[in-house]
Amino acid sequence: MAVGTVLVTGGTGYIGSFTALVLLQNDYNVVIVDNLYNSSKVAVDRIELICGRRPAFYEVDVTDEAGLDKVFAENPEIDSVIHFAALKAVGESGEIPLEYYRVNVGGSIALLRSMARHNVSNIVFSSSATVYGDATRFPNMIPIPEHCPVGPTNTYGRTKTMIETVITDHIEAQRNNNKKAGKPYEQWNGALLRYFNPCGSHPSGVMGEDPQGVPFNLLPLLGQVATGQREKLLVYGDDYPSRDGTAIRDYIHVLDLADGHIAALKYLREHKPGVRAWNLGSGRGSTVFEMIKAFSHVVGRDLKYEVVERRQGDVLDLTANPALANKELGWETKLTLEDACADLWRWVDNNPKGYRQDPPAALLEAVKANKA
Ligand SMILES: NC(=O)c1ccc[n+]([C@@H]2O[C@H](COP(=O)([O-])OP(=O)(O)OC[C@H]3O[C@@H](n4cnc5c(N)ncnc54)[C@H](O)[C@@H]3O)[C@@H](O)[C@H]2O)c1
């Protein structure tokens, strides 16, 4: 018996596909909606390959309210949504802001409207540590707690902050309106999950991040340097007031992050708290140079990099204080940065073309043997 059915928007993407996998492994049923803008349908096959269960898949754009209505109508058992679908490139968001507001904010509004029409009342939202902006502008806010005031420094972060507000207003209104009308209201809940820096791949080496264009995150870029697809890594600034001059981030293994979604969903269903924000991070900050060193170590050779100017909108330190999620959700990271580096390398080394190739036979055999 399934414990629930979850609609996962953006579910063929990087974090969405891992969350879909972990949901299935925890006996949820999964329905994926994705327009494949930055992902491949092959992710659905890999999920099934690893866990033996296949999520339903709909190629639908999250801004298409009628399309979403159809998905909910065809799957009346959906009781919760985990919402990943978004555009996420910080630099690009400053160049085409209207597209970012249309897809990220407009898509979230379309989703919430369609959910309300179908009485789907729990939403877990992919927010980001980016909402905090430069937390060093306040004293004692590193590592960053949830009560740190938000102050995004780029368009992408502003879309995330805005969606958090839209979800909060909407869920509160649903609760208040139902309460006034003497109807049950506690079923309306939202989790705003502020991710720090997701990284890593599945340890099997058959599932990982497969962006359609140029990757934007440090580890996938390093992966491309290691496989020779990229000549060198550009390090944006070595004049930050950190231990080695490079910016500090909190790297979290994507499987730990996926677990955090299951914990948040469970909390919403059991505690019915209204809207809550939780940081999902490890609490450990690493500099860019430390990451280059850790990844070079698993690859077994030094990877080439070049220091260039700081990037506009980048901040010194985004390290999470994950105490609230540790306490309330009973969740904490289990995997290390070294695990993430080793898993990522196994993925890119064996699948340099991502999902546009089959994984090596030995890895496939090992996955099948593991499942049997
Ligand atoms: N990766 C990170 O570093 C990071 C950090 C914090 C927050 N997030 C957020 O987590 C979520 C998932 O990120 P990811 O790294 O897995 O990115 P991703 O690009 O791999 O996944 C996003 C998915 O959404 C889909 N999508 C985009 N526009 C869509 C639309 N209009 N309709 C339907 N589907 C659409 C894409 O095809 C993709 O599969 C995003 O909301 C992102 O902003 C990511």
Image: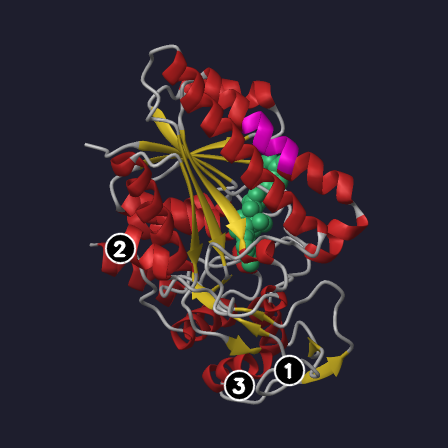
In the rendered image, which residue does mark 1 sit on? 241
**Residue 107: in magenta span:** yes
Q: Position of residue 353 (x, y in %)?
A: 58, 61
Q: Residue at x 64, y 54 (%)?
A: 151
Q: Is mark 1 within 8 Å of ligand 1?
A: no
In the rendered image, which residue does mark 3 sit on? 293
Q: Give the residues in magenta.
A: 105-111
Left or right position of 345 against 323: right
Q: Earlier in the sequence, mark 3 or mark 1?
A: 1
**3D distance between C-alphas at marks 2 and 3:** 32 Å
Q: Mark 1 or mark 2: which is in front?
A: 1
Q: Position of residue 126 (x, y in %)?
A: 50, 46
How crowded is the residue under tag 1: few (<14 C-alpha within 10 Å), some, or many (20+)? few
Q: Residue at x 51, y 43 (%)?
A: 84
Helix or strand or loop: what does disc 1 sit on?
A: loop
Q: Earlier in the sequence, mark 2 or mark 3?
A: 3
**3D distance between C-alphas at marks 3 and 1:** 19 Å
Marks 1 and 2 close (CB-CB < 8 Å): no
Quick check: can you spot residue 36? no
In the rendered image, which residue does mark 2 sit on? 330
Q: Is residue 280 above or below residue 162?
A: below
How crowded is the residue under tag 3: few (<14 C-alpha within 10 Å), some, or many (20+)? some
Q: Position of residue 66 (x, y in %)?
A: 58, 18
Camera-side residue of 138 and 286: 138
